[in-house]
Structure formats: structure tokens, C-alpha cells
Image (cartoon, helix red, strand yellow):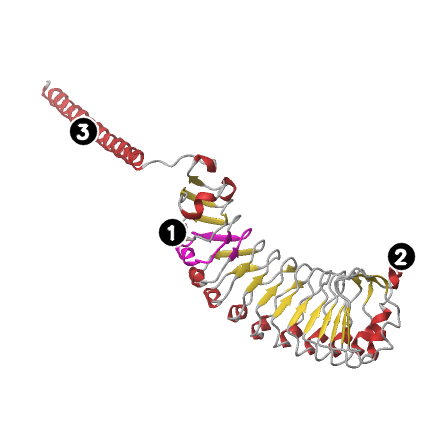
Amino acid sequence: MVSDSLGKNNFSGNLPPNFVSHLPNLEEILLGINRLSGDNNLKGESSIQELSFLTSLTNCKWLRKLDITLNPLIGILPTSIGNLSTSLELFQAAACNLKGNIPTEIGNLCNLYQLSLDNNDLIGTIPPSIGQLQKLQGLYLSENKLQGSIPNDICQLRNLVELLLANNQLSGSIPASLGELTFLQHLYFGCNKLNSTIPLTLWSLKDILTLDMSSNFLVGYLPLDMGNLKVLIEIDLSRNQLSGEIPSNIGGLPDLICLSLAHNRFEGPILHSFSNLKSLEFMDLSDNALSGEIPRSLEGLMYLKYLNVSFNRLYGEIPTEGPFANFSAESFMMNEALCGSPRLKLPPCRTGTQRSTTISWILLKYILLAIASTLLLLALIFVWTRCRKRNAVLLTQAESLP
């Protein structure tokens, strides 16, 4: 027997410590999406132990695939995991209620191309030994309680295509050497405590499709190099402390579907180049300090389903054609002086006639003010001249008296 494929059933019960020890030739153990458990299910939280059944798998010297995803195992990964077959290519243990640290010995699995430990309760730091998994293409550690910095050793995984570290408690800087992962397509660092700038090297990843660094404490500005990401589909940098103006060449990302820069400190206008994002479906620029008018050229974004520019300093008339016909008041609330349709709960915009009339009255007011000032000045000159002549006459009369 070389394959034990029992996944996607409703099997329950404990996995015994000597699990499959009598089947040393197994190449695949696929038990994902069941209700299988470890010995710790009958014990209290304070006595959580290692998952001993994983130790028994060290006898399977030809094991290539191990999938125990979505089982309530509740246990700690044993250090013996490093003694699993060096032929192991896939190890999936997502959503298994795993506790404790990621063992350093995991770096011994030199032929691993996918490691999935996401959606667990793993703590501690990411072991630098992960950098030894030179064939790794997918590293999934999201939705845990991992702390510390992102180790530079991860940047040694030159075949990495997907790197998911979101929803942890990681802090410190984003490694500049991430730019050396030239095959990287999906990068998720969102919902951590990262507090650096975004390294310039990151914008050289020309194959990147998805970039999520939302909900961190990132600072700095977005460089023009952002325009290098020509195949980018989704970028989420929301809820950081990024500042400056949005790069003008962002319009050169023709495949972009989702753009979220909300809850930052961006300034300047909403760019006309946004109208070149013909694939765009989602755009959130809310809670920044953007100013100016909403470009009417955005009416050409026919696939745009969601727009939020609320809580900025925008003014002027909101476009009405194309996707703007479907947006609600929430998309535009709390700006400086936007105007538009009553359904958007905004004051109506002045028509051309009204604007012309207003301008005429303003001009007339200044003209009348100028005339009044001139007349007043002439009157003052006239009075001063009369007074001067009168004083001269009185002085002459006084001198002629004996």
C-alpha cells in the first residue's frame, strides 16, 4: 500500500501513537477535512502534549505527501518532525489547533515544496532554519500568534511563489532582501506590527500578482518604482502611516482589479491616470488627506463596483456617468465641499448660469467699491484744496492789517 487517502470524510476519533507504523512503504497520507483528534482532546489546556502519531510516521521512508488539514488535533508539533522522510514534498496541517513553537528541526525536510501551518495557535518566532527549505514554493503561516521579526533566512527561498504571514504579531522591518525572491507572486504581510518603510527592492518583483501589507505601522512614501509591477492584480496598503502623493504612474498597471490605500496620510489629488486602470473593480482611498476634484475621466472605469473616497478634502462636482450612477452617499461622505445629486445627501452644484451670475455680482461689487473709493478720494482732495486756499486768504488778510 503506497497511498492512504481518507480525506473529506466524516471520520472521527483519536489517531494512535503507532499510526501506520506497520505501513512503511506509504507515499501519501491524506487525512484532511475530517474530525480526527490527538490524545490531547481528553486533557486540559495546561497539559497539551506533542502529537505522537507524527513520530510514528518517521518509519515511512518514502512518504511524499502528508495532509492532516482541518482536523481538531490539538497538540504540539514534535521535534521528531525533522526525522520525517527527506522525500516529503508536501506537509499540510492548517486549522488543526496546533500549539507551541514551530520546531527548528523542520528545516531538515529539504525536499519540501509546500508547508501549510496556517490557522493554528502557533507561538514563538519563525525559525531561521526554514531558510534551508530551498525547494519551497509555498509557505503558509498566516492566522497564528507568531512574534518577532521576519527572518532574513526566508529570503534564501529563491523558488518561493507564495509567502503568507498575515494575521500574526510579527514586528520590526520588512527584509530588503525580499526583492531577491524573483518568482514571488503572492505576498501577504497584513495584520501584523511591522513598523518600517517598504523597501525599494520590493517594487522590483515584476511577477507579483497580490501584495497585502495592510494593518501595520508602515511609514514613508510610495515611489515611482511602484509602476514596475505591471502584472499586479491586487494591492492593499490600507491602515498604515504612509504619506506623500500617490505615484502618477499607478495608471500604468493595466491588470489591477483591487486598490486599497485607505486609512493613511496620502495627500494631493486623485490622479487622472486612474482612468487608465480599465480592469479596476474595487478602489478605496478613504481616510486620507486627498484634495481637489474627482476626475470626470473616472466615469470610464466600467468595471468599478466599489468606490470609497470619504473622509478626505475633496471638493467640486461628483461625476454622474458610468459607475458613478450606482454609488451611494457613503462613498463620498465627510469631504470639504463636494456637491452632487440629492441621493448622495450633498448640496446641489451651482449651474453654469448661477456661477456666471455669481461672478457678475462679485465683479460689480468690486467695480462699485472702486468707484466709491475714487469719489471719496476726490472729495477729500477737494476739501483739502478748499481748506488750503481759505487758509491762504486768511493769512494774507492778517498780514495786511496795520
What secondary structure is marked by label 1?
A: helix
Q: Nearer the viewer, residue 51 or 248?
A: 51
- Residue at numbered disc 1: 297
Q: Which residue is mark 3?
A: 378
State which region is magenta. 258-283
**Closer-to-camera residue (3/131):** 3
Can you tell which quarter of the image residue 41 is in? bottom right
| Residue 334 x/y as whole percent | 50, 41
Quarter occupied by residue 350 = top left
Which quadrant holds residue 29? bottom right
Amino acid on which disc 3 is placed: Leu
Residues at marks 1 and 3, CA–CA distance in whole angstroms: 54 Å
**Helix, strand or loop at disc 2?**
loop
What residue do we see at 51% from left, 53% from top? 282
Return the disc, 1 or 2, that comes first in the chain's sequence: 2
Q: Is residue 64 left or right of residue 348?
A: right
User: Which class describes the residues within 10 Å of circle 2: few (<14), some (14-19), or many (20+)?
Assistant: few
Q: Is residue 172 above or below residue 281?
A: below
Q: Secondary structure at mark 3?
A: helix
